[in-house]
Image (cartoon, helix red, strand yellow):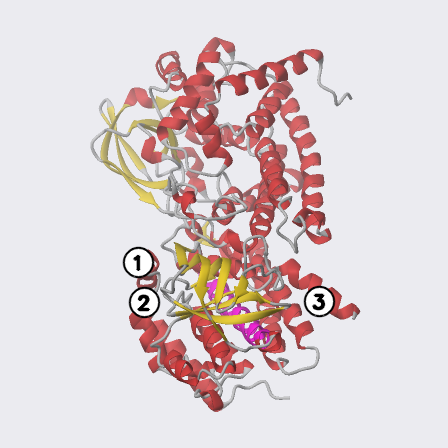
Amino acid sequence: MDLSYTPEELAFQDELRAFLRDELPLEIADKVRTGRGLDKADMERWHAILNARGWLAQNWPRAFGGAEWSAVQRHIYDVEAAAASAPRIVPFGLSMLGPVLQTFGSKEQQDHWLPRILDGSDWWCQGYSEPGAGSDLASLKTRAVRDGDHYVVNGQKTWTTLGQHANMIFCLVRTDPDVKQQEGISFLLIDMNTPGVEVRPIILMDGSPEVNEVWFTDVKVPVENLVGEENKGWTYAKYLLTHERTGLGGVGASQAALAAVKRLARAENHNGKPLLQNPHFAARVAQVEIDMRAMATSNLRIVSQAAAGGAPGLEASMLKVKGSMIRQEINDLARRAAGPYAMPFASEAVEGANDMIPDPLNAGPVAAQYFNNRKLSIFGGSNEIQRGIIAKVTMGGGV
Amino acid sequence: MNFDLTEERQMLQDTLRRYLRDKYTTSVRNRILGSEAGMSGNIWGELAELGVLGALFTEAQGGFGGAGFDIAVVFEELGRAGVVEPVLDSALMGGRLLAAAGKSDMVEEVIAGALHMAVAHGEPGGRYDMDHVQTQAEGDTLSGRKAVVMNAEAADHLIVWARDGDGIGLFLVAQGAPGLTVQGYPLLAGGRAGEVTLDKTPAEPLGLTLGDYETVNNLALVAISAEALGAMETATHLTKDYLMTRKQFGRPIGTFQALAHRMADLLIELEQVRSAVINAAGNLDAQDCDLHLSATKNLIGRAGRLVAEEAIQMHGGIAMTQEYELAHIAKRIIMADHRFGDTDYHLERFIALSAA
């Protein structure tokens, strides 16, 4: 047991800090720091900068063009990047589809799709949830029927994050309706420019156009876009969800968000004194910080274990629940800290919207972020589903 | 003891509930939210016609109510329907301050729905501190800046707090007066506010004492608490319906004990909130009125957060979407914590008053 970084890890941290200082565009960091929405070009630009350094696909094996970072290296990146207000890496191609293709895809699929994820040729989105299949994902109804060398796809996906920017979508589709739900699902790659694909935005409660509905009407998909075997998609989906969850502790983002709360609470806006000197508020901040310190170590322990022996199940669920609760508590503190200036409307996603808030504290859209981040305990398998997994693994019971 | 509404208040509640259910639908409100004015002149006129604004004033003031329970009845219904029109700031606070100052002609206009008011109290850096007033009165003019002033653009007159010699005074400022600028913006939970700057702006002293203001501020605390209660009723109602109809894993999700128990907790909290509003409305004339009001506002803040967050969580993604009723209602509940002192402000005040 040794909690200190090795000399190699410290050197890596220095290298990373220098990289962020020199390469992260100021205008992009400024948008992230003040909670303004990033447009597609901002996100693509940051991906290209990371890719040029070889650091975009951090968890991919080197054989596929990845950085193959250790768990500790990824943790260091997570913390340093968030502290520097770097944009989050868009996860759909890099953290979700990439590992699935590397594990279950054909050589042709790997050779074709993986380089295109790295160089930004494709923007992927995720076609999992449906209006009737959220927590109960296996009940999904989008149908794919084999017709010669094509599948014909009909149905609807929803909550498709950043689908408005995407040209490709990986989908769970039903290929056999007559067997046990989990055994009739396949994993299909669909070009969103195919006739019959329609994307409709869903405006969230904070005003952001972040998620979409995607409709499929007689969409023809070449059979070579089937990943792995037909009707084995549920196995691949579970593998992907586990990969998705390991990132959800969100330690770096929570640390950066808490630092922002403290900055805000140091302003002398509470009876002429900093709010941070108020015992009630200070206690709230301290409690969440104490939880966060423990969670950061849990995160490292679990990710290290995963690196040694495959994907974690139970522990990933625990991290997702605790990580989302901590982040949401920090968002709540931020809105409290802003006081009456939490009330003006400025959407995170509407460019320039913040400029109309004449807030002397420069709090940013803290209330919009508070509401937007309620999603953290809903998406990627709701916290109720995660608790069900924890209970089932531990006690063998049902949901 | 009697916990029944009087016949008049019951009628007021029935009338207002029916009117808002029929006229103030989600789609109507979404249109209002998307509009430049951020409120509907038609709705405002009809609220006046129905006597809703008049119910906020005593008979002596030209109304037919004005007591704590009249205000609670009105605002519970406004909260239930997620009404964004500025009844609290323009009619209740503005009107009652005018009444206290003896401006009966203006009060009459407020009750008729013909006059809009704004109350400019808070200042940048003041947070919820009532004494943090740096706006300065000099002769017949005011200079300074006021923060997040509700209804500032639509108001025909503003009632402005300012330092006047050794004390604090309240002044009447007409919209469009020289040196007055209003920078308006929409609010996250609907309605509009603005940053108000005054630069040697002509103002009329209202001759009100701090006690007069506190009386009106207490009415506002009852109103915002009752509004949050109404909104929480809608949130729990929507959640209960959703749990009974949304099916996953082949059965309504409300049949899962983990969710059923959390729904039960919301219903328990809702009754706590209802009683807390009664405690506030019924103790406005009590010696320890401030203690009751802080207890209520603190409880509303805690229960409100639980109800809003749990209602969203138990719905899942659908509650995150702007067009679903709960999204707006949840915003109203949470943002009520940012008015007239938040959960912690009132916890501290309760502690201080309890120790006294």
Q: Which mark is residue A337?
A: none
Q: CA distance from mark 1 to mark 3?
A: 40 Å
* Residue B169: quarter of image: bottom right
Q: Residues within 10 Å of mark 2 (few under 14, many from 20)?
A: some
Q: Position of residue A79 (x, y in %)?
A: 60, 27
Task: Determine if marks 1 and 3 fall on one subunit.
Answer: yes
Q: Secondary structure at mark 3?
A: helix
Quadrant location, the N terminus of chain A: top right
Return the residue at label 2: B40
Residue B350, which numbered label? Answer: 3
B216 in the magenta segment: yes
Mark 3 belongs to which subunit?
A: B
Residue indicated by mark 1: B35
Q: Chain of mark 1?
A: B
Q: Quick check: B180 above or below A59? A: below
Answer with left or right where residue B101 lies relative to residue A351: right
C-alpha distance separating marks 1 and 2: 9 Å
Q: Is residue A201 left or right of residue A347?
A: left
Q: Nearer the viewer, residue A39 or A186?
A: A39
Residue depicted at 32% across the width and 35% down the height: A164
Q: Position of residue A202 (x, y in %)?
A: 35, 45
**Residue A174 against residue B35 in the figure, above or below:** above
The amino acid type of the residue labelled 1 equals Ser
Query: Foreground: A255 or A59?
Result: A255
Residue B86: x and y in percent read 42, 68
Give the mark count: 3
Tags 1 and 2 touching, CB below 8 Å: yes
Does residue A187 appear in the picture of this structure? no
- Three-letter amino acid code of the residue under disc 3: Phe
